[in-house]
Image: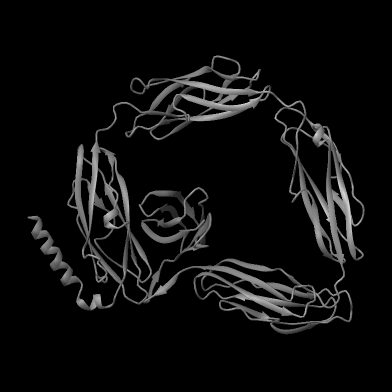
């Protein structure tokens, strides 16, 4: 069929499938990546396949459903998963997975068209056209080896003082694009300063597998050494069947004294500032032996006078290189006024650090009038099941005044839904040491992640007239739309910083896997298939090594795949 006829048929199909009334709804749609920036499949070995994804989202805020149909590709190794026609609800998204499995070598091109009933007044074309391309390449005849030392044919173990041992590792990977086993041998070093502690000897690696080689270095003099090497032989193609890695390491002169480091102080002092009588404040600092040689740091920590005290870490100590000691200091004034003292640390370090003084200061303050205490200051209901029961949490408001004549008065505001105070809300009047107990409940009618606060106002006289009790919780479960059951995925929190939990609810025990991809369809995280019990479940993603941006979670339960967009903000 001529190409112009194909375009005519597509235009007719679009006019028949989507009436002008559909466009009048003003449905908004987004394609990620857009057809202009869709990446090619690159080089793919014959007999293997590679996937790319297109995320289609109904960005409308009304009740209009986004209807889509797919035409193409025509073949030549390209295909897609899922139905050719589908609908996407308001605010929901679907993921189109494209496959490229070349059968012959060379560049292959094809096209896929996505027809839709979205508003085209903002220069959006209908149908949306994606140009597909990929190159089939012949399979490797030999396994491929990649040795990652960071410096080509050199491997720098690092620098360490004379007499100390350090270790560093590099990897050997089978980078074959076919199923070919890489076999070989990792030789030992030739001098006693270096040695291969793990990974030496024969190895066998399937495609994609990695062997870790760890090298230790113990210098006997202060100098740089690069006269040693490791020989790696394998069944890879020449010249990579014999690889020589030159080992580098440097020895330095060790310090004649142990070294001391004091951590946890601001400006070398401990200032407790104002402390209300009879309360107690606590501060912590550390003593660490940072010696670059095997030298023991010995010394003692003096005990200050009242109202200061050391509750742990006073007296004599002995620390090997790298070890740390924690010292806990308290300030508990019984009378008003400014107090000063000093903690003295004596050590066997160098002359400048043999005597270390840590000044202490703090002021005892008497506060007249009522004083408020609220415990706790935050309540997290955790993950709850939609429509199920939720536990009740309690918070206590207490008058901790010093005088029996000081009455605490105040009021408690109700939080917004789904949180509520079932007992103890409203105004309160408390005598000395009296308290009121709040019972807080969270409704589970609607799914989602919720946050709110309870504000407590009082006549407290110690700068705590306004307390904020923070509330949070997540409801997971099944939602209902148009009489049909709809699977619900959540991410808590979302947007998130480094960590989030992907939540879902299972009607019965099922095998579940999770894949997270970026806007280009590149996989950044995967959780292998695992059996999960019926009820609320979650899979945590630690994205500390991933850049900020928009990502899509692809949750597969049996043969069904569900998607959810999440935002990483660092």
| Image-based side of 496 in relation to 412, left or right | left
For image coordinates 42% across by 74% down, the residue present is: 480
> How is the rendered protein coloured?
one colour
Q: Quadrant of residue 287?
A: top right
Q: Quadrant of residue 239?
A: top left
Q: Percent from the top left, x then y, of residue 527?
A: 46, 50
| Image-based side of 207 in relation to 44, left or right | right
| Image-based side of 334 in relation to 40, left or right | right
Q: Is residue 535 visible?
A: no
392 over 195 or under it: above or below: below
Q: Nearer the viewer, residue 239 or 256?
A: 256
Q: Nearer the viewer, residue 499 or 174?
A: 499
Q: Percent from the top left, x then y, of residue 520?
A: 35, 52
For image coordinates 13% across by 68% down, the residue present is: 12
- Quarter of the figure with the N terminus: bottom left
Q: Percent from the top left, x then y, of residue 34?
A: 30, 58
Q: Is residue 459 visible?
A: yes
For image coordinates 19% across by 56% down, the residue present is: 72
527 over 105 or under it: above or below: below
Please give the count of numbered marks on the rendered protein: 0
For image coordinates 20% across by 72% down, the residue present is: 18
Q: Quadrant of residue 164?
A: top right
406 over 117 or under it: above or below: below
| Image-based side of 78 in relation to 451, left or right | left
Q: Percent from the top left, x then y, of residue 340?
A: 88, 55
Q: Nearer the viewer, residue 340 or 549?
A: 340
């Amino acid at each position: 069929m001529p190409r112009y006829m194909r375009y005519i048929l597509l235009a007719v199909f679009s006019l028949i499938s989507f009436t002008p009334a559909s466009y009048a709804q003003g449905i908004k749609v987004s394609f990620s990546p857009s057809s202009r920036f869709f990446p090619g499949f690159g080089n793919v070995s014959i007999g293997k396949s590679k996937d790319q994804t297109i995320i289609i989202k109904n960005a409308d805020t009304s009740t209009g459903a986004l209807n889509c149909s797919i035409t193409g590709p025509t073949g030549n190794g390209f295909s897609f998963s899922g139905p050719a026609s589908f609908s996407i609800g308001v605010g929901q998204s679907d993921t189109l997975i494209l496959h490229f499995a070349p059968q012959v070598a060379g560049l292959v091109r094809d096209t896929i068209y996505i027809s839709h009933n979205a508003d085209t007044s903002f220069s959006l074309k209908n149908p949306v056209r994606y140009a597909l391309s990929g190159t089939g390449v012949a399979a490797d005849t030999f396994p491929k080896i990649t040795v990652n030392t960071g410096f080509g044919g050199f491997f720098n173990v690092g620098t360490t003082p004379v007499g100390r041992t350090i270790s560093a590792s590099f990897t050997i990977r089978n980078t074959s694009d076919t199923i070919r086993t890489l076999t070989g041998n990792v030789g030992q070093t030739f001098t006693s300063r270096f040695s291969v502690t793990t990974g030496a000897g024969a190895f066998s690696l399937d495609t994609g597998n990695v062997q870790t080689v760890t090298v230790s270095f113990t210098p006997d003099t202060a100098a740089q050494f690069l006269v040693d090497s490791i020989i790696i032989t394998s069944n890879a193609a020449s010249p990579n069947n014999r690889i020589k890695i030159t080992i580098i390491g440097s020895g330095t002169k060790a310090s004649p004294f142990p070294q001391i480091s004091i951590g946890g102080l601001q400006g070398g002092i401990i200032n407790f500032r104002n402390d209300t009588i009879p309360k107690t404040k606590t501060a912590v600092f550390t003593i660490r032996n940072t010696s670059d040689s095997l030298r023991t740091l010995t010394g003692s920590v003096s005990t200050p006078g009242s109202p200061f005290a050391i509750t742990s870490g006073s007296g004599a100590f002995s620390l090997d290189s790298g070890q740390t000691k924690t010292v806990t200091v308290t300030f508990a004034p019984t009378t008003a006024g400014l107090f000063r003292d000093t903690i003295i640390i004596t050590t066997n370090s160098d002359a400048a650090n043999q005597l270390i003084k840590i000044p202490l200061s703090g002021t005892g303050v008497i506060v007249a009038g009522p004083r408020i205490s609220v415990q706790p200051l935050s309540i997290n209901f955790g993950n709850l099941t939609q429509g199920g029961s939720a536990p009740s949490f309690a918070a206590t408001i207490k008058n901790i005044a010093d005088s029996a004549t000081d009455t605490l008065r105040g009021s408690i505001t109700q939080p917004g839904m789904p949180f509520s105070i079932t007992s103890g809300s409203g105004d309160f009047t408390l005598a000395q040491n009296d308290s009121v107990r709040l019972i807080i409940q969270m409704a589970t009618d609607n799914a989602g992640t919720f946050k709110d606060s309870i504000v407590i106002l009082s006549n407290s006289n110690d700068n705590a007239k306004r307390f904020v009790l923070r509330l949070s919780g997540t409801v997971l479960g099944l939602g209902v739309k148009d009489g049909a059951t709809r699977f619900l995925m959540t991410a808590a929190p979302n947007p998130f910083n480094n960590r989030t939990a992907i939540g879902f609810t299972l009607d019965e025990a099922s095998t579940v896997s999770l894949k997270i991809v970026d806007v280009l369809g590149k996989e950044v995280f995967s959780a292998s298939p695992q059996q999960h019990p019926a009820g609320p479940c979650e899979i945590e993603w630690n994205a500390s090594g991933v850049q900020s941006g928009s990502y899509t979670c692809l949750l597969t339960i049996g043969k069904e795949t569900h998607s959810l967009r999440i935002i990483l903000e660092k």
